[in-house]
Image: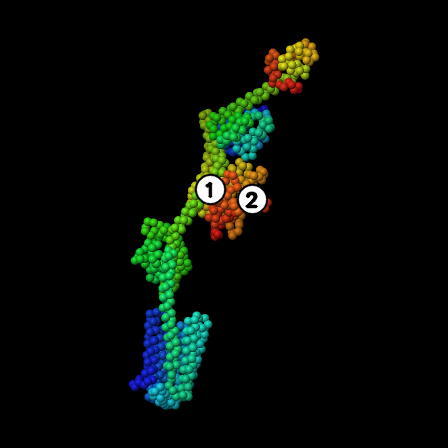
């Protein structure tokens, strides 16, 4: 075997094709080196290199000077042919993303067997004997072709492997064609079609040569040129598309930043592998972090209010562990003095290829919103407080009585004790009894004052679980004296099994007190026997608890039903018309409801429906 | 007839016990009641003493209790105690014959004074009643004819005129007058007139 020294036209053409293929192969191999994910490029470079090898082996055969040399060229020809089959099959699988795995493995195994047989047999797998060669004119040159010869006993294996390749490629192309988009369909048609056609043509032609039907050289090179071009075109098109996508992505990012900026949203991203923060200008402005130091997570985190830092950290860690979304409101101090409220929400991603973890987020300055909320809440608290003061005003005379009774008793007891002492009769038992009575009355008076003070204090809302019965007992303690002096029979029917409701004890007492006083006013229009008000509770819809106040009064007048909860609407001569409006506001701020309905048998029932622990509000 | 007793009425047990203690220390006999109804059920028209009642009570309140006592002819003087200065009600109470109207926080001396005055009034009243009772008993001994003569005497008629009016002799009139003065235990016509003023002579027994 010897490299031909005199170049023919065919030699030049085939060499140029081989060189071109090598160049293509190198280009795509280089691309794979830069972008390891581009494995289709690696497969393609294998195809291109193998193709160059095939071309060289072919041109070698064409210039062989005797039968043995020609046979040797054919034997070596099988090595790049193996690469061509393998590369094509793998490329199809990587590029189209389809192709049956078992067909691929069978093909590889079969071609490996062919390769083994080829190098074990003499002169090669295709022939068992090559008796002569001939020189024929071909494309303006004189080339060597096989003359008298006998096909090898295993050469049908090559036929089967070609069939297998065709089936595999067609199957993969059809599968891709069925499910892919327009670009993928074109790729499937182009690659599947050219591989199918050219493998069929090349195989048929090769068989004709092997069986001596035609006297021509093997012409795999020109036959496989179209599939090679098709693959190269598709890869190139893919690269083109990737760069177009990259440009679109860049445009999109600019648009997103513009939109986020105009909405005062800051975008930030924490890259766990590089431990860097990437943030937009808005995000940096919100946090008061300069561009130079914005990469360090520490620079951001040190601005967070110490009281909120742990909560924020926990929330983001949780998102990192679970890969879920996160959201938190927290305070920061951008300049070390002022305080801003920030809302952040986003998503953490784990197990990204090549990245440890990534946290993305959107920052928003919600200080103004927060302040407005605070002011609204403050106003609501003030209003509720005013409402309580007014309610207690209605009770003032009975409350004064409740306080003056024990005070009067204390005074009389003290006077009696003074007289006993003056008289010199030191009746110890009597004096002890007097002191005990004084202490008890003192406690009684203080309890009333404590109740009043609790109701009259300006205070923050404190939400805690509390039982319906406890709330009703609080209300009973406040109104029982008033009810007695007005001749109203006030009754509390406890329901011990109910789950506790969630709310502010004082505000809920206020709502019930308001409703109970209204009920007592309502029954005052009735004869004494019907002056009944009952406090009771039950489980309502959505696992809420309903605190009910039922009266035997005249009920809500038909025209009033829709108006009684409106501010400044009143049916009483002395009312401001704010009690029920405030009460409903309180109920709704608790995620509850306050409704009033007439009973079929007369009278009205007002229900305060409240969420219980563990049941969402809404 | 029982001894003069202060009847305390207040729905507040602690308060009623304290006042009772004080009045007992002042030396009064005291009975306590937790409602007006309990008081009405526990006394009769002959009960002596006074009533000290809370003006604000559930059920029978102070003024209603006062009216009820009058209805069942219990004439014991009533002293009202009130937790609040309530002018219209105090005026009403006084018009209905309350002896006094005190705030609950009034000093001990005022309360003791009010109770003392009430008991005095009751004592005077019962003395008056006892005297009237005794006179009526004495008048009861007179014969119908003697009553007719007495009525004429009290009107200032001379024996001769009386004899003419009643159609009896002047001597018989003199005899009746001697019998009357003996029975009533008086010694002069003037005394007779004073005594007879307390009795309704127009209404022959």
Q: Position of residue A460 (x, y in %)?
A: 42, 45
**Relative to residue A35, is residue A618 drawn left or right?**
right
Q: Position of residue A12 (x, y in %)?
A: 32, 83
Residue at 47% x, 40% y: name it: A390
Q: Position of residue A369 (x, y in %)?
A: 40, 51
For this rendering, which residue is in front, A501 or A270? A270
Please tell me whether mark 2 sits on a helix, a strand or a loop: loop
**Mark 2 highlights which residue?**
A557
Which quadrant of the figure contains the N terminus of chain A? bottom left
For this rendering, which residue is in front, A478 or A418? A478
Residue at 45% x, 73% y: name it: A177
**Mark 2, other Cα within 10 Å: few <14 / some 14–19 / many ≥20:** few
Q: Quadrant of residue A164?
A: bottom left
- Residue B123: image tag: none
**Relative to residue A607, is residue A202 drawn left or right?**
left
* Residue A250 in sight: yes
Tell me the chain of label 1. A
Q: Position of residue A185 (x, y in %)?
A: 43, 72
Relative height, residue B147 to residue A89 (above, below): above
Please tell me whether mark 1 sits on a helix, a strand or a loop: helix
Q: CA distance from mark 2 to mark 1?
A: 24 Å
Q: Residue furthest top?
A: B171
**Mark 1 highlights which residue?**
A387
């Amino acid at each position: 075997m010897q490299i031909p020294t005199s170049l023919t036209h065919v030699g030049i053409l085939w060499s140029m094709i081989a060189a071109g293929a090598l160049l293509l192969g190198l280009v795509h191999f280089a691309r794979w080196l830069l972008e390891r994910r581009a494995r289709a490029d690696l497969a393609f470079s294998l195809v291109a290199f193998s193709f160059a090898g095939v071309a060289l082996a072919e041109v070698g055969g064409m210039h062989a000077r005797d039968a043995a040399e020609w046979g040797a060229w054919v034997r070596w020809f099988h090595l790049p042919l193996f690469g061509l089959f393998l590369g094509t099959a793998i490329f199809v699988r990587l590029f189209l993303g389809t192709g049956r795995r078992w067909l691929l493995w069978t093909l590889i195994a079969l071609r490996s067997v062919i390769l083994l047989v080829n190098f074990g047999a003499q002169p090669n797998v295709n022939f068992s004997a090559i008796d002569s060669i001939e020189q024929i004119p071909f494309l303006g040159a004189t080339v060597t072709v096989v003359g008298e010869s006998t096909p090898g006993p295993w050469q049908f294996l090559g036929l089967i492997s070609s069939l297998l390749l065709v089936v595999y490629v067609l199957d993969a192309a059809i599968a891709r064609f069925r499910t892919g988009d327009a670009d993928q369909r074109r790729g499937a048609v182009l690659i599947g079609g050219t591989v199918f056609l050219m493998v069929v043509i090349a195989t048929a032609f090769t068989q004709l040569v092997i069986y001596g039907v035609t006297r021509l050289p093997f012409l795999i090179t020109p036959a496989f040129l179209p599939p090679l071009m098709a693959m190269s075109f598709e890869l190139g098109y893919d690269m083109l598309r990737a760069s177009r996508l990259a440009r679109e992505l860049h445009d999109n990012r600019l648009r997103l930043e513009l939109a986020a900026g105009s909405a005062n949203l800051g975008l930030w991203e924490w890259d766990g592998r590089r431990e860097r923060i990437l943030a937009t200008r808005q995000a940096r402005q919100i946090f008061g972090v300069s561009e130079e130091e914005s990469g360090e997570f520490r620079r951001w985190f040190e601005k967070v209010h110490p009281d909120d830092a742990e909560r924020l950290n926990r929330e983001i860690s949780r998102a990192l562990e679970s890969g879920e979304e996160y959201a938190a409101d927290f305070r920061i101090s951008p300049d070390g003095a002022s305080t801003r409220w920030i809302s952040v929400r986003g998503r953490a991603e784990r197990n990204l290829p090549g990245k440890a973890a990534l946290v993305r987020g959107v920052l928003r300055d919600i200080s103004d919103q927060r302040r407005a909320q605070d002011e609204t809440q403050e106003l609501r608290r003030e209003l509720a407080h005013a409402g309580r003061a007014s309610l207690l005003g209605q009770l003032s005379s009975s409350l004064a009585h409740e306080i003056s009774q024990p005070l009067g008793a204390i005074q009389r007891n003290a006077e009696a004790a003074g007289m006993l002492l003056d008289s010199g009769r030191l009746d110890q038992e009597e004096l002890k009894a007097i002191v005990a009575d004084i202490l008890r009355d003192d406690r009684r008076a203080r309890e009333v004052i404590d109740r009043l003070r609790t109701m009259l204090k300006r205070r923050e809302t404190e939400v805690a679980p509390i039982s319906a019965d406890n709330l009703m007992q609080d209300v009973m303690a406040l109104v029982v004296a008033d009810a007695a002096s007005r001749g109203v029979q006030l009754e509390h029917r406890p329901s011990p099994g109910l789950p506790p409701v969630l709310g502010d004890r004082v505000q809920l007492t206020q709502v019930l007190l308001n409703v109970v006083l209204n009920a007592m006013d309502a029954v005052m229009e009735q004869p004494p026997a019907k002056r009944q008000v009952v406090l009771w509770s039950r489980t309502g819809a959505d696992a809420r608890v309903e605190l009910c106040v039922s009266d035997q009064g005249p009920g809500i007048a038909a025209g009033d039903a829709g108006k009684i909860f409106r501010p400044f609407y009143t049916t009483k001569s002395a009312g401001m018309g704010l009690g029920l409006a405030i009460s409903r506001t309180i109920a709704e701020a608790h995620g509850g409801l306050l409704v009033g309905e007439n009973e079929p048998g007369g009278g009205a029932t007002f229900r305060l429906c409240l969420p219980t622990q563990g049941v969402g509000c809404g | 007839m029982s001894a003069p007793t202060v009847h305390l009425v207040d729905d507040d047990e602690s308060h009623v016990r304290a006042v009772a203690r004080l009045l007992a220390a002042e030396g009064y006999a005291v009975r306590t009641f937790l409602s007006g109804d309990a008081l009405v059920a526990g006394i009769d028209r002959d009960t002596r003493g006074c009533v000290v009642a809370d003006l604000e009570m559930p059920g029978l309140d102070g003024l209603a209790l006062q009216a009820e006592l009058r209805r069942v002819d219990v004439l014991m003087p009533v002293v009202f105690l009130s937790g609040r200065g309530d002018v219209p009600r105090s005026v009403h109470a006084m018009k209905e014959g309350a002896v006094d109207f005190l705030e609950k926080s009034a000093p001990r001396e005022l309360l003791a004074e009010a109770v003392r005055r009430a008991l005095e009034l009751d004592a005077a009243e019962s003395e008056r009643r006892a005297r009237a009772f005794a006179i009526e008993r004495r008048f009861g001994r007179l014969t119908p004819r003697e009553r007719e003569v007495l009525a004429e005497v009290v009107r200032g008629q001379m024996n001769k005129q009386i004899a003419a009016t009643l159609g009896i002799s002047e001597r018989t009139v003199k005899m009746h007058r001697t019998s009357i003065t003996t029975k009533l235990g008086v010694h002069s016509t003037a005394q007779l007139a004073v005594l007879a003023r307390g009795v309704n002579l127009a209404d022959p027994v």
